Structures are given as C-alpha cells and as structure tokens.
C-alpha cells in the first residue's frame, strides 16, 4: 500500500503539468513563470559578476594558476547555490499566485475554498499567503537543524544522505500541498497531521518535485505544476472511497 501511495503521489505531479495547460488556468501560471525567469536570470548574472572575487577569496595569489582547473567545479557549485536561492525566492514571491491557482484547480474539482476564505479580501489573502510562507520556512529550518544533528553525531552520520532525501521530499510535499490545505481552512497543526496520515502519497509527490526541479528548463514550470498537482492530491484524498471527484474534468496529459 505504501508503495502504491508513493507512486500515486508521484503521478500527481505529472497530472499537474496537464492542469497548467488548461484554458482558464494559464493566467495563474504566466506571471509565476515570468517571475521565475526574471529571478533566475538576475541571480545567475549576480553570481557571474561575483565569481572572480569569490575565487580570489578561496585561492591565494600564489596559487591563482589553479583557478583554471577549479572553474568547472566552481561553476557547478555556483549553479547549485543559485538554483536553490532562486527556488526559495521564487516560491515566496509567487505564493499569492500559487494560492489563486490552487483555488482555481480545487473549484474545477468541485472543492471550493472554506467560507471564511471566500469572504476575505484580496489584500488579506496575499498577506496570509506570505505569512504562511514564513511560517513554513521556520518549520523547515527546524527540520534542517535535526538533519545537522544527525550529520554531526558519529553514530548516525551514515544516515545523513537517506534522511536528507526524505527530508527534501517531505519539504517539497508540504511546500505545495500547503496552498490547498490553507484554502480548506486547516491550521498549521492540522496540516502536519494530515500529511502524516498521507505519508506515502506525500513523500511520492515530494520526491517527484525534487527530481523535476533538477531538470533544466522543466524546473521553470515545476512550481505551478506542483501547486496544481498537489491540489488534486489533496482533493482526491478528501473524497469518500469509491467516489472520484469530477472525473470528467480531469486534465489531459
């Protein structure tokens, strides 16, 4: 069952790519995509401009000849750092748009937002989305502290890669499922408890998100696709057994 849930959760991300191609939903995708391109380009340009100064800090002048040998490794390191910085910032700035996208997908699946959310103002929804992102970051920071302790303790150091992968998948699931759960009116504690109950599907979805973000070009569309896919995961896991939600409105692809 856990394996089936894991694979089903991973497929939800693929379905998310189908959702964002649907008419009526593209308007929630275009702006985040442009934000992603702008932030990534600006971050990459800034890293390129600072590269030589960073290299001079690492290497003394007498060993400057090593710079040519270290360029490939250094460029790879800068790309990795740039990518994760870009992802963090893009998710924060794009959170209000992601919030609206999750709401639109949920409506297509006959799962409207909570009554309190429907009556709240646009400004309050934006501020709530940004505050929610900050709270998630605080939670993720605590998880990373736990990973650091595992790495520092000699008897558990060997577990660090496995725990790190699981942690990345869990964070990926929480990051994008949060929009649908927030629209449904769940508290932070209720979100965590629901994710634990759906651990297999959540980890499968999160693992697929982590894998997709490593693919060049595809990573630009991962954010909206993950929001849409996570919303379908959430809605379909709320439906009574044997009663699929709006099968006629399923996305193509």
Image (cartoon, rainbow, N blue to C red):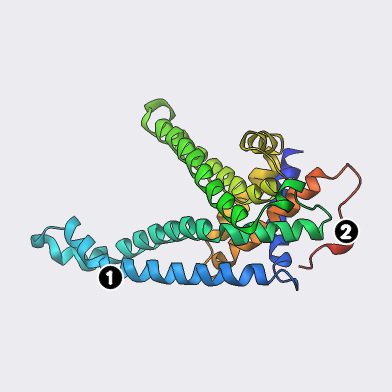
Q: Which residue is mark 2?
A: 247
What is the quadrant of residue 103 in the picture? bottom right
At mark 2, the secondary structure is helix
In this rendering, position of residue 117 left or right of residue 131: right
Q: Which residue is mark 1?
A: 49
Residue at point 30%, 62% (across, down): 74
Mark 2, other Cα within 10 Å: few <14 / some 14–19 / many ≥20? few
* In the foreground, 187 or 149: 187
Residue 158: percent from the left, percent from the top?
Answer: 44, 34
Residue at point 45%, 32% (across, down): 146
The N terminus sits in image quarter: top right
What is the quadrant of residue 41 in the picture? bottom left
In this rendering, position of residue 47 left or right of residue 66: right
Residue at point 47%, 55% (across, down): 88
What is the quadrant of residue 104 in the picture? bottom right
Residue 115: percent from the left, percent from the top?
Answer: 77, 47
At mark 1, the secondary structure is helix
The C terminus sits in image quarter: bottom right
Q: Kindly report the distance in space between the C-alpha atoms of the residues bearing marks 2 and 1.
A: 51 Å
Q: How many marks?
A: 2
In this rendering, position of residue 60 left or right of residue 139: left
Residue 42: percent from the left, percent from the top?
Answer: 39, 70
């Amino acid at each position: 069952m856990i394996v089936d849930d894991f694979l089903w959760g991973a497929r939800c991300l693929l379905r998310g790519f189908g959702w964002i191609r649907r008419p009526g939903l593209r308007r929630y995708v275009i702006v985040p995509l442009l934000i992603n391109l702008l932030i990534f380009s600006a971050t990459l340009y800034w890293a390129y401009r600072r590269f030589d100064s960073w290299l001079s800090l690492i290497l003394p002048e007498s060993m400057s000849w090593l710079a040519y040998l270290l360029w490939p490794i250094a460029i790879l390191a800068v790309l990795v750092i740039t990518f994760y910085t870009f992802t963090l910032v893009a998710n924060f700035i794009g959170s209000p748009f992601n919030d609206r996208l999750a709401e639109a997908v949920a409506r297509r699946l006959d799962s409207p937002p909570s009554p309190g959310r429907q009556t709240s103002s646009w400004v309050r929804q934006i501020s709530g989305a940004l505050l929610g992102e900050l709270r998630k970051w605080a939670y993720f920071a605590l998880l990373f502290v736990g990973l650091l302790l595992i790495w520092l303790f000699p008897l558990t150091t060997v577990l660090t890669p496995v725990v790190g992968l699981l942690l990345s998948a869990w964070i990926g699931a929480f990051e994008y499922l949060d929009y649908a759960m927030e629209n449904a009116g769940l508290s932070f504690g209720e979100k965590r408890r629901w994710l634990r109950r759906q651990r297999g599907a959540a980890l499968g979805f999160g693992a697929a998100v982590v894998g997709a973000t490593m693919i060049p070009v595809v990573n630009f569309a991962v954010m909206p696709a993950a929001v849409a896919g996570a919303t379908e995961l959430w809605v379909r896991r709320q439906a009574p057994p044997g009663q699929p939600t709006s099968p006629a409105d399923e996305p193509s692809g």
